[in-house]
Each structure stands twice: as C-alpha cells, then as structure tokens.
Image: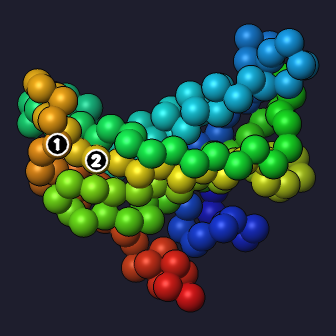
C-alpha cells in the first residue's frame, strides 16, 4: 500500500480490517470498543512487519502497556466497510516510554473516520512494573526521520 496521500503523517504502516456483523451494536454501527481491538491488531501487525516474533517479548520478559488513550470518533463504520488502519510510532525515549498514533480511513473513499493516540510504557511481564525496553522493543519503537520531521513542522 504505497499511496500515503491523505494520511496525517508520512510513511504509515497500514493494516486493513473489515467491519463485520458481530462488530455492530444496538445503534446499528461498529461499537466503539471494536476500534480499540482494531488498533491492537494493527499494532501487532506492525510488530510482525519487522519480522519479529512475539516470543522475543516473552523471552525478554518485556511488553508495552497502554497508559493513556485518546480517541476521536469522526464518523461511524458499518457492516461491510473496508477500513485501513494506519499506525505510526510518534515518540520514544528508547528506554521506557513510547507513543503510537492511529488513523482509520474508509478504503472506498479515503474519508478519515477515527484518530487515536496511545501513550505506552514498557513493563516487566513478570510483575507489571515499569522496566527498560529490550533491544528489540527499542529498535521497533524508533520514530522514523520523516515522521519526526512532520511532527516538528
């Protein structure tokens, strides 16, 4: 998916999802909680795109936990909607803290329907306490130069 025009930031990682019947709530649209599931799936797909095995996290006893989440629901999604979920690493100290941003757009018309920002902290998987990132996490949670430049404008 090389066409990144219309995205909030350059060089997005894009993961495609589809709204299914089980995602629909009593109001006839995708339930708000489903968006977080899509964000999580997209984060793991982003991890996988680096060729990294989740077993590396278990072996290092490290993982990233969401400590703050901000979401903007711009338009509803409905059964059958194909959606592109864009993911960016937008901040990282390479030790403990990082940030991911997300944007969801409809495939058929490119309209943005959702944006989110997750602040993350590295934790020790044995005790849940903050811990220094493993080398794999520190490498994965690097802000790409094009993204850093766009954020500084």
**Percent x, y for residue 65?**
33, 38
Rendered residue at 58%/33% (across/down):
36
Height in image: 149 above or below 35?
below
Neighbour class for label 1 at 10 Å: few (<14), some, many (≥20)? some
Neighbour class for label 2 at 10 Å: few (<14), some, many (≥20)? many
Image quadrant where one finds the N terminus: bottom right
- 146 vs 121, left or right, is right
Task: Name the element at disc 2.
Answer: strand
Rendered residue at 78%/25% (across/down):
30
Name the N-terminal-most of marks 2 and 1: 2
Q: Is residue 52 visible?
A: no
- 40 vs 124, left or right, is right
Asked if marks 2 and 1 touch (Cβ < 8 Å), the reply is yes
Which residue is disc 2 drawn over?
121
Task: Name the element at disc 1.
Answer: loop
Rendered residue at 66%/67% (across/down):
8
Height in image: 14 above or below 94?
above
Distance between the Cα atoms at labels 2 and 1? 7 Å
Q: Is residue 96 visible?
A: yes
- Which residue occupies the foreground of this view, 20 or 114? 114
The quadrant in which residue 111 appears is bottom right
**Percent x, y for residue 118?**
47, 49
Which residue is disc 1 drawn over?
130
The quadrant in which residue 18 appears is top right
């Amino acid at each position: 998916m090389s066409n990144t025009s219309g995205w909030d930031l350059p060089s997005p990682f894009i993961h495609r999802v589809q709204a299914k019947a089980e995602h629909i709530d009593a109001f006839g649209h995708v339930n708000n909680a489903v968006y977080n599931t899509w964000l999580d799936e997209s984060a793991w797909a982003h991890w996988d795109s680096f060729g990294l095995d989740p077993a590396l996290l278990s072996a290092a006893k490290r993982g990233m936990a969401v400590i703050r989440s901000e979401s903007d629901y711009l338009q509803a999604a409905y059964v059958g909607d194909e959606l592109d979920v864009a993911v960016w690493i937008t901040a990282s100290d390479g030790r403990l803290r990082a940030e991911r941003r997300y944007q969801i757009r409809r495939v058929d018309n490119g309209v943005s329907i959702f944006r989110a920002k997750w602040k993350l902290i590295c934790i020790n998987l044995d005790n849940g306490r903050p811990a220094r990132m493993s080398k794999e996490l520190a490498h994965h949670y690097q802000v790409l130069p094009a993204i850093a430049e766009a954020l500084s404008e």
